[in-house]
Image (tube, coloured by chain):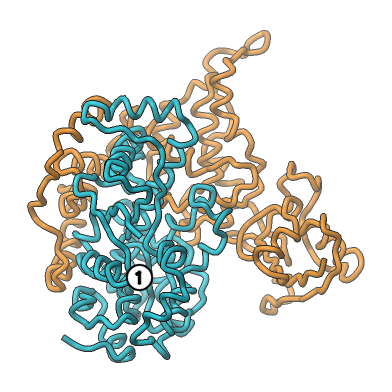
Amino acid sequence: MRYAFWPGCVSKGGTPELYPTATSVAEKVGMELVELDQATCTGAGALGEHDPKLVDVLNARTFALAEREGLDTLLTICSTCQGVMAAVNYRLREQPEYLAEINETLREEGLEYKGTLTVTHMMWALVEEVGIDHLKTMVFRPLRGVKIAPFYGCYILRPRYVLGMNEHPNRENYLEKLIEAVGAEPVDYEGKSKCCGFPILTINNDTAVTMVGNHSSEAKENGAHVMVTPCPLCHLNLDGYQPNASSKRGNNINLPVLHLPQMIGAALGFNETELHLKRHIISTDSFVEMSGIQRA
Amino acid sequence: MQANLKIQRYDPEVGEEPRYDSHQLDLPEYATVLDALLQIRDDVDGSLAMRASCRSAICGSCSMRINGEARLACKTLIANIVQVEGAEVTIEPMGNMPVVKDLVVDMSMFWDKVQKIQPGLLPKTPEPEREFIVSNDSMLDLATALNCIMCGACVSDCTVLEVDKEFIGPAALAKAYRFSNDPRDNATDLRLDLYSQENYIWSCTRCFQCVQVCPKDVAPMEKIMSLRKQTIEAGHTNNPGTRHTQAFADSIRKTGRLDEIRLTVKAFGITNITAMIQLIPIGWRAFRHKKMPHLLPKSISSIKNVRRIMDKLGNE
């Protein structure tokens, strides 16, 4: 399967471990990624707070770039990008007149979005295109005995009507399915579908850090050895601000947080360097040891 | 149709921990969760405390958590739940509000918050002698906000209220939008000034939970987003929220992508010395783990087109 690929800014910035791991996993499972090097930031939900139309134009521009490559599906590895793009795509496809208006702005660059694109996340593509059964046959190193807490975050779950949940109701359980597919055990806890707090980190730091503490502690209390997330922004907060959450709560939470492609890559046989596990704030040593991942 | 209702029971006056009672029921296909609960209360256990009235999704009395999500019991068909989520249906009281007994919560906090946004028209002129005619268009814009039946579902499941009790919450802010955008109201600027203060619009994390659970499609979060835009346009910009969204535009204009370092500094505000000092250990942590974003990120080669688009749309 060939995809237009938008990695998102953070996968190469604040979480530089994500991009190389995700692209290697994609190659291994047979996803051909055509990266859109001229695409822009999606606005991440924040730009739209003062300029929603700009969000629509910038993302329509990205969609037009994908169509120009002759591709019909755009794959991303960032839930936030995916959520924003899915919402824009929904609006544009529902309102042909508005789409025509947006295309007027793109015309000078020789671009037009025809409305043919489907937006997907690597998590969805792994289940719906690669398939759980096929993925299982590729597992080289089953993560037996590892208890993994799924953390979905917001943008890949809500709102349902934008994300095709009516057609694919199981999308709300894909992380658990993937955790099982790699031989690990999913850990259930209430926080898995709540907000990580990242969007208001600079606005209301206390709330954002409290959320990190609540979710990581709850997962740990329910037996998790590690957490896994499909969203690099959740990762920035859950991993990057976990030390702050620990000091706030007065106990060392110490729960490693994996990006989804790192969990898949670990099961596919990648070594510690290939998984870029040293680029985490919370040490992943316990996970490396438990899973039998080859050290660098 | 067979369904197993697991109902949370709790009476704070007795002082025991909350427990769950299970009821195996044979129900008709058209049964709602409310039908099932009434059947239990009437035929099995008269001590079950719950609120319900109209049975038609109009009065907003019967919101409760059904399989972990706030919904109206009268609008939720058991058959739909059983089909998608399995034969066991868990019923709990709404969240974020103290439980009075079983499925009844104390909504004082909900009403206090709605009161804070001045939920009444502050008119332009003395009381008119006859009705005030407003345009259809202006009321159409308010229609979704007017749909609110004050059921509390959005407040129950708000992920911010769970950790920040000071947040005014989604229901009050949807109501705020309804009044600040009413052509008969004369206090828009005062309202927008209030809403741009701490604990109002900028405390929302944009998690979509309120959009998801609202049984009347009010979409409170979308109203909050509109209020953010309106407060900025009205010049209420000296707040971290405005700095944050503006920093996104600046970064995209400069490189087409997110310049995370500058975005963070701008969003906190470079003159915010406390925040800047707090960023030092975080920056050092990132540096030590080789995850510091580029100090001087490169622009995409077609950046001129991005800037032209932003100019054309008037984004400064």
Circle count? 1
Q: Secondary structure at mark 1?
A: helix
Hue used for the chain lettered A: cyan
Does the image show residue B57?
Answer: yes
Left or right? Give the position of B140 relative to A114: right
Residue B6 figure quarter = bottom right
Q: At which x and y percent is residue A262?
A: 30, 74
Chain ID, mark 1: A
Vertical placement of B184 versus A194: above or below?
Answer: above
Q: At which x and y percent is residue A93?
A: 46, 37
User: Which residue is situated farthest in the top direction here?
Assistant: B129
Chain shown orange: that is B
Does the image show residue B11?
Answer: no
Q: Residue at x 29, y 91 (%)?
A: A292
Q: Residues within 10 Å of mark 1 (few under 14, many from 20)?
A: many
Identify residue type, mark 1. Leu
Q: Return the residue at label 1.
A: A260
Left or right? Give the position of B131 relative to A286: right
Q: Residue at x 28, y 83 (%)?
A: A269
Left or right? Give the position of B51 relative to B302: right
Q: At which x and y percent is residue A211?
A: 40, 65
